[in-house]
Amino acid sequence: MRECVGHSQELTIRNGTVLYRASRSFEKTEYLAALKDVSLSISPGECFGLIGESGGGKSTLGRCFARLQKLTAGEILLNGHPSCSFSAKSFHRKVQMIFQSPAEALDPSQTIYSILAEPLRIHFPGLGRRERKRRIFELLDLVRLSQKLLNSKPLALSGGQRQRVAIARALAVGPNFLICDEVVSALDSDTKKEIFNLLEFLRKTNGTGILFISHDTNAISQLCPRAAILHWGKLLATIPSQELPRTPKFD
């Protein structure tokens, strides 16, 4: 990731600003800037960290990259083209976001099979039932989940298992870029390591570009060679992750 505008095979935010209305009176409306003129690019096969304090704009930036949050000013570019030139379906085949809380991101009324089958039905309507089932088995194997869980619902799974299901759902469409928002913050150390290994495998094998968002410098340094520091919506620096402050977390 670089502080630059997009090239042909990158996911880019250019001069991105997000304002939220903080208060409104008869005389004026006051706004809070969640992002302030941020420009960054993610390249294929790159795992880049985004770090900063809680509430400092990291998740907002991730949601903007994934076209889940509108910019007040600036633009998102995918492969050199404005994101608005892609349909939502086409864009989200290329860019997927994995959220911090899979318990909230996964429909508790659906089985794991239904959760994984849904994106396949939407994005690959010509896929037959047998091929769809085979793809679901491949996804489970990739994230190291048992096929025995397919008839279970999310609340019957552990936190680590739910996060793997969320990752498998994101991978179902074969995205070029993954936006990972605090995806290991609630997991134990062994499960964290497995998720790190999976993301590294995707980066190396599929050339997936990954934005890894965290407030934990240890997590960033384990996975990402370089990181950007975001402070209250403003990009401060892009540095090697080993040069991040020694304190374990930005709180």
Image: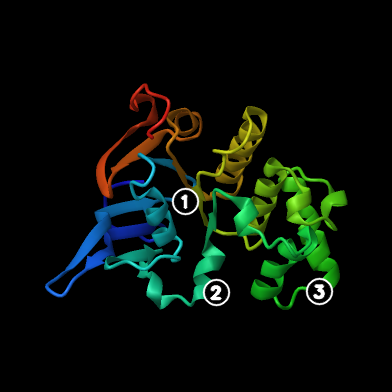
| In-image side of 212 versus 229 (left or right) | right
Asked if the residue at tag 3 contacts the one at tag 2, i.e. Cβ–Cβ closer than 8 Å, the answer is no
Q: Give the residue displayed 43% in from the left and 42% down from the top.
A: 48
Instruction: Please identify the quarter of the rendering in which residue 113 is found.
Output: bottom right
Q: Give the residue displayed 74% in from the left and 52% down from the top.
A: 155
Q: How far apart are marks 3 and 1 (CA)?
A: 30 Å
Residue 6 shows up from this direction: no
Q: How far apart are marks 2 and 1 (CA)?
A: 20 Å
> In the orientation shown, which residue stands out farthest toward the front?
26
Q: How many marks do you count on the picture? A: 3
Give the amino acid at mark 2: Lys
- Please state, as top left, top right, bottom left or bottom right, where the C terminus lies in the image: top left
Circle 1 residue? 44
Q: Nearer the viewer, residue 102 or 220?
A: 102
Q: Nearer the viewer, residue 55 or 180?
A: 55
Give the amino acid at mark 3: Gly
Please say if 197 is above or below 213.
above
Please say if 36 is above or below 24.
above
| Crowd rating for badge 1 (residues with CA inside 10 Å; few <14, some 14–19, many 20+) | some
Give the amino acid at mark 1: Pro
Q: Give the residue displayed 38% in from the left and 25% down from the top.
A: 242
Asked if the residue at tag 1 contacts the one at tag 2, i.e. Cβ–Cβ closer than 8 Å, the answer is no
Circle 2 residue? 89
